[in-house]
Amino acid sequence: MVNESKAVQSGVERGATRDELILAAADAGTSTAELAERYGLTDERIRQIVRKERAKAAGGAGAGTDLVVAGRNLEELAARRTAGERFSDADVELMLRGVAKNTRRTLRAAWKRVLRFTGEHGYDECPMPVETCVKMINWCWTQRGRRGRPYSPQVVEHMMWAVTKAHKVAMRPDGVRGYVTPVDSEEVRRAFRGYRRNYATAGHRPDKASPIAPDEQAAMVATCDVRSPIGLRDALALAWLYDGGFRAGELVIADEEDGRLGVLFQDVELHADVDWDTVDWTRPQDIVVRGATSTTDTRADHVVIHVPLSKTDTEGDGDEVILPAHPAKYAFNCPVRLYIAWVALLRQRKIPLNGTVVKQVLSGGKPPADGRPKNGKVIPVGMGYEGLARLYLRAVAAAGLEDPEGRSRHFALHGMRAGSAEAAAERGADTPELNRHYRWSQFGTTAQRYAARGRKRRQNPARRIWDAV
């Protein structure tokens, strides 16, 4: 044990890596089991590290001057602390700000799964050979995720993404950062395609949000009793979600610490002539505005909503969404009329027009016996994601959209955005239009998928079969 202490102390003084310290302790006579317990690794992992470090040491001893390349001593570079360990707290905070919190959460969960796989089998996670990456994909089939099913293809894809990220930032022994990722190999791509096929043929389907059709959105808004503050708030949120194609994190508070506070009053421009003294907020459908259709040439009343930060605009360049007023037939779910009514309610109750537009409403107690709605209390606090999700599911249930068996459709907030995009594509919106309105990256394929789906419905040959009969 004295020899081990001296060897380890010597390694610490020269900045040795963890694997070099394990080799020094093993050479000093420490057992594999003791090292495994000390470092929290499996016995096989310890043996693998020892073999790797001994092979590296043997190669270095025989290489002689080959370890000096262009004036760089590779032994010293391999033993030094990496640049990542010398980043200050401010440096780390700045880099974290460059990645969305949800992305970091997903990446962290995926990397934990990768480490569990490598720890169980004693494999290296970085650099990871192609064969190990294929084994990892195969291992995912033996694990159990949601509802007792194997990991979904999306989870496996996240793990492969984590492996790629790790290979990009890892420090090599020669001091250069980055390895070639095994994920780009043909073998791994084939294995992943095989995994997806097995997942589908086993009867598993991904839980994709069921798109909400325009008539279904209208039915959901119609269930909101706009005579009450909570009903008016719900109708406004559903109208903006659908017409604007907002992500939940764009409309309501997603992360106060990260500055994602949803749509603020200062982000909204109302382009309409409004006589606020005559507005009855309990009857938004009666508010007179100039509506629009896809064929009108006259300027319609509208709201312009500035989106300062979104999923595809991580640098904060900003974007804007224009929501025109609906024609009279759909006045009840018009985003402009409902916004005017909401502002009129807040003005009447002397609630400042600042902060998040979609606010929380307290509506305790039983409704009046004469059928009038509860008189909820609007509080100057913005709604969060969970509140918006409950609002959505409450409207889905009230509109009777749920399948009686609960099997055919999966309702989630994204269904509003997906249904809105599908409806726009089916009615002729092309890829650039979809990219602009729904704030998708022009380099992605999301808008192309919706546009192709819309063309398929518009130009369905099966319709022409019976049109000619």
Image (spheres, helix red, strand yellow):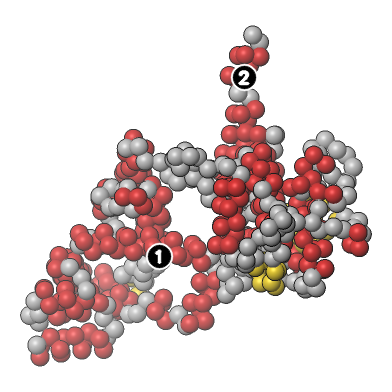
Q: Position of residue 207 (x, y in %)?
A: 45, 46
Upstream in sequence: badge 1 or badge 2: 1
How far across and how far down the image is residue 228, in percent? Answer: 72, 59
User: Quadrant location of residue 230?
Assistant: bottom right
To which quarter of the image does residue 39 belong? bottom left
Q: Is residue 34 depicted above or below 160 in this figure?
A: below
| Image point (29%, 63%), residue name | 115
Residue 265 in the image, given as x and y percentages of width and height: 75, 66
Task: Using the image as rendered, state which of residue 312 and residue 65 is in the foreground.
Answer: 312
Check the image and report above or below for 455 versus 17: above
Residue occupying image coordinates x 53% and y 65%: 100
- The N terminus lies in quadrant: bottom left
Placement of 70 over or under 434, stated as above or below: below
The residue to which callout 2 is attached is 463
Residue 226 in the figure: left or right of residue 22: right
Q: Nearer the viewer, residue 249 or 137?
A: 249
Camera-side residue: 49 or 366? 366
3D distance between C-alphas at marks 1 and 2: 48 Å
Say whether residue 185 is left or right of residue 104. Answer: left
Q: Can residue 167 be seen by looking at this rendering?
A: no
Quadrant (top left, top right, bottom left, bottom right) of the C terminus: top right
Decide which of 221, 323 is in the foreground and name it: 221
Is residue 419 found left or right of 99 in the rendered image? Answer: right
The location of residue 218, given as percent across then percent down, is 68, 43
Check residue 446 in the rendering and tell me which mark sits there, or answer none.
Answer: none
Tag 2: residue type?
Arg
**Nearest-to-viewer mark from 1 and 2:** 2
Q: Residue, x 61% and y 44% (percent of image)?
A: 399
Residue sticking out furthest to the top? 469
Query: Which mark, by number, is residue 108?
Result: 1
Question: Farthest residue toward the front?
Answer: 369
Amino acid type assigned to the residue bearing label 1 in the image = Arg
